[in-house]
Amino acid sequence: MSNTSRYFYQFSALHALLIGLMPFFIPVLLWQHGGSLAELSLVIAATGAGFVLGLMGWEWLRSHRYVSAMTSELQ
């Protein structure tokens, strides 16, 4: 398995863990500290947008194979 693939799976697993925890813990904490429903929705939307931007970065890395070749030489 290439380094890019391995890093992608690590990124996806970490994000899935955070997304799995976020609907339960982060909104409750924000709500307890006086956050409004609009603020909670903004946090959830920003997390989703961050994931989409991260996927765009991974797509760029996948399409530019010379980057993965350079990183494998550095290791």
Image (cartoon, rainbow, N blue to C red):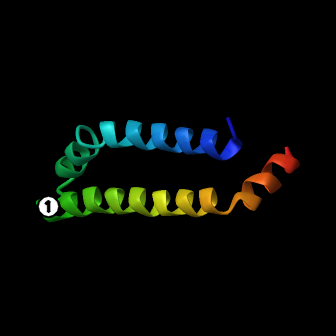
Q: Quadrant of the N terminus?
A: top right
Give me the residue at 73% from left, 53% from top. 68
| Left or right, residue 23 beside residue 21 | left
Query: Could you tell me residue 25's position as x and y percent?
Result: 27, 39
Query: Could you tell me residue 10's position as x and y percent?
Result: 55, 38
Query: Could you tell me residue 22's position as x and y percent?
Result: 30, 43
Q: Quadrant of the C terminus?
A: top right
Give me the residue at 24% from left, 51% from top. 30
Three-letter amino acid code of the residue under disc 1: Ser
Q: Is residue 74 above or below residue 16?
A: below
Q: Residue furthest left?
A: 37
Report which quarter residue 60 is drawn in. Answer: bottom right
Q: Is residue 6 above or below residue 53?
A: above
For the residue pair 15 and 67, the one nearer the viewer reads as: 67
For the residue pair 46 and 30, the one nearer the viewer reads as: 46
Give me the residue at 40% from left, 60% from top. 52
Give me the residue at 41% from left, 56% from top. 51
| Left or right, residue 25 beside residue 15 | left
For the residue pair 18 and 60, the one nearer the viewer reads as: 60
Q: Residues within 10 Å of mark 1 (few under 14, many from 20)?
A: few
Q: Which residue is mark 1?
A: 36
Query: Could you tell me residue 8's position as x and y percent?
Result: 56, 45
